[in-house]
Image (tube, helix red, strand yellow):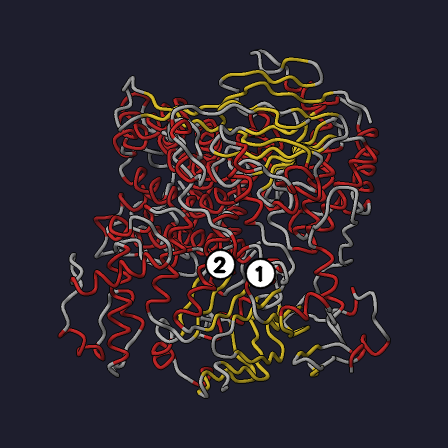
Amino acid sequence: MFKKTPESIVGFIVVVSFIVTGIIVTVFDLLGIRVTPYNPIQQNVGVALSGPSWDHLFGCDFLGRDVFSRVIASVPNDVAVSFSVVFVAIIVGALLGSLAGFKGGLLDELLMRFTDVIFSLPVLVIAMVIAVALGPGLTHMMIAMIVIWWPPYARMARGESLRVAHQNFIEAAKFAGQRTLGILFKHVLPNISITMLVYATLDVGTVILVYAGLSYLGLSVRPPLPDLGEMISNSQDYLITAPWLPIIPGIVIAVIVIGFSVLGDGIRDALEAR
Amino acid sequence: MEDLLSIEGFSVKYTTSSGTVTALDNVSLDLHPNELLAIVGESGCGKSTLGLSIIGLLPPSTATVSSGSVLYKGKDLVKLDSNKIREYRGTEIAMIFQEPLTSLSPVYKVGEQIAEAIMIRELRKKGHKVHSDLMQHTYTKQTQKISRLPRLSRKIPTELKNEVIDYLKLVRIADAEQVLDRYPFELSGGMTQRVMIAMALSQEPALLVADEPTTALDVTTQAQVLKLMKELMHKVETSILLVTHDLAVASQVADRVIVMYAGEIAENADVYSLFSKPLHPYTSGLLACVPTGYKDTKELTPIAGTIPDLRNPPTGCKFAPRCPRAMDVCTTTRPHLTSQEDNRSVSCFLYE
Amino acid sequence: MSSETILSTENVTKYFPVRKGLNPFSKEKRFIRAVDGVSITIRKGMTVAVVGESGCGKTTLARTVALMTPPTGGKIVFSGRDISSGRIDRTELYKEMQMVFQDPESSLDPRMKVGQSIAEPLHGLMGWKKDEIDEAVKRSLKAVGMSEDYAQRLPRQLSGGQKQRVAIARAISTQPSLVILDEPTSALDASVQAQILKLLLDLQKEFKLSYMLITHNIAVAQYMSDYIAVMYAGNVVEYGPTKTVITKPRHPYTIALISSAPIPDPTKKNLLQVEIKGEVPSAITPPPGCRFNPRCPYAESLCSEQNPALEEISPQHFVACHFVQKTA
């Protein structure tokens, strides 16, 4: 599935751990069982601002909450956001892009100009508008990102569809009685999906990064609920006195993003060799 | 008559992700001055590799010459490093490729490119060391001497211009004056191919290597281009090594034909002998494949089977699995090219 | 020999509009006259070869006849039905008319198994049940000389020749009456080409197929066809029984074309006798009158004024030339 270099294997491990952690935490959360060493929102002023120790692997924040537990507890958010956004982006992008590329003409123009408009919207501005309109929160940020995340996929799908549309097997499908929609689903989409999936793997990391930025700005989950970006923003003041507080969530984000990135590279290398 | 080109025991291997492919296996041939030698074969037989390796254009990362020599006027081209090869490539040894549009620079006018070719020829004649990099309008340290000549800006020097027009007329391009000022993409396929020939011949090369020069052309244009190559051969005293998959084309223009199969030479004979009396079963098979005659008259007898996997060639003769006259020895031992009468050779146990 | 007419075109034209200049709202239109009035007839069990060089319109003709693109004018009659008039159910049409394309590499969906590709027209057109379809796929593979287990393979596991066989199997799976062959062997090696041509001939005999063979290769046309139509710049310039057109070509272009085809016989150096000047004309602004007149060695003033129509100069042999007597 992917080219096994040292980096891509590490990336694979990171990604799998990320996803598995997210699933486990969510499932057990629904069952009401706590998986993390400490309750992520439990305050314990006595150990506030204590550094990493065997008791508290990542130390405690200014309210005495265990940072490690908070990090683990915030993974499901990131998993949910990143996968949902990319998932919807692929679907919407693939459908619009392949339709545009395959049919061409006026439809192509309209769809692509629409794509261009959406593409020009900055995610931050949209996020803030939605935050103002609907209030902050995880789902709202997901919506904000979904709304503007699909244009690159549409462009990619369109380009790939153009390439596929000229192949003889598409003509043959017409001789087999297929109409546009049938050809799109049976022939075009399967043949463009690989490129898009590779891009998506790399993209998941970017979503996490952007989402971290949004939650840093306070647009996502509000405290005391944990969220990586929000954890960074709330502990900025402690950069000198308790550096692990802003730095560790930052490193966690970086590791996850890089993990997706190298895994995506590995997948792309494996596919190119074929 | 000294041989212009003498290839001896030449083998080339490609390394691929799925194994090592022996593209050329112990190939030996001679090319005489003023001769048109056609190398004929189907895809994968190694004919293009042969053409490319003569002038050192094999991809260095994957291809290796594992044995043999390519003697051009007595000098082993294989032993030359890439700088030295350039003194021959594009000058004494010219090449024409299948896709004319990818061989001409798209950013310079046709006239300018031919003029530059002529300039290089003149420099070479005067004994200057020339790199074929010049053909790309790049100047390296060693060619400082050339800078004394007028820079090839937008104007072609007049004395060159007339010669360029002469060459364009030589390749039957009407409106040579207008074509001078055109860019390659403005011309049709046939015209660009003729421009390529003009450029190659303006070098007054001793050897012209043409790799499927007419495959991408219409049949009438092909006829014109081939006729032209044959005429020019005698006018300019060039030898031509023509690589083609088309036996009919070879029969029309070649003096001598070499048939290749799976990286080896199957048969080497003058064109008349080859077609009237093919010795190697592959040659006869190939001849029987060319459609002649009308519907419902002569049966085409295709050659059974497919070409062997060059990563894992069969032991013994590579054609044996498909050969209607294969004998026991054919599956165990490799045949060698053996000389026959009438100045021909064949690699087949039927004749050893 | 049945003389039932499978396909007949009457003056069919196909023009492609081309905008003059860059203004998207400009009313001025020019046209690429790709097919400019072609009338051919194909009878049951026969092969008509449409030969010509690039730009002559032969591929466009094939695509127009197959209604891949709607004709601009003229009539196309298939098995007695006028299919050129507006509303035609292509599902019904393609049960009887199929096409094999030039490039075997792109003729099969790389993500679909061979059996699925062959079954596609059966699913889309015939409405058969799974069992019937599976049987038909097996039969088709057998008919093209491939074993059943090829149905499970992917295209990338097949050679070029095998891919083309699969494409042929797919085309005959609905048991059509007409198969349009668009340069079916141009991308194949000589020995593979021979296999495919032999296969096509065998299939024609077995299933009484009619072929419309598009090719630029005279030898292939000669070997495969009963009739040849020679196209130049959108027109048919000569049309007749294969042997007649090959041995007694009368249109100056046909003469040049036939003599340009290299004969695999070194004692017959036909190539070196050929002399044809000029280039194929622009399809947007063809030369006035006869399209070939700028290059024709026999041209006179009438040739640049009037485009000649096809005239029967001997039984079944048609030539479009004002001065055809000059080539007698």
Where on the picture, by quarter, is residue A122? top left
Q: Is residue C123 visible?
A: yes
Image location of residue C98, percent across then percent down: 67, 29
Decide which of C20, C296 is in the foreground and name it.
C296
Alpha-carbon span between mark 1 and mark 2: 9 Å
Where on the picture, by quarter, is residue C125? top right
Kindly indicate whether the residue at mark 2 contacts the one at mark 1 (C-beta within 8 angstroms).
yes
Q: Residue at 76% x, 58% y: name it.
A: B303
Q: Residue at 35% x, 45% y: name it.
A: A209
Image location of residue C268, percent across then percent down: 62, 58
Left or right of A242, for residue B195? right
Locate the C terminus of chain C and report the quarter of the image it occupies. Answer: top right
Mark 1 or mark 2, earlier in chain: 2
Q: Is residue A180 visible?
A: no
Residue B226 is tagged as 2
Where on the picture, by quarter, is residue C280? top left
Where disc 2 sits, the SS reads helix
Image location of residue B79, percent across then percent down: 45, 85
Residue B252 is tagged as 1
Kind of residue at disc 1: Gln
Total numbered circles: 2
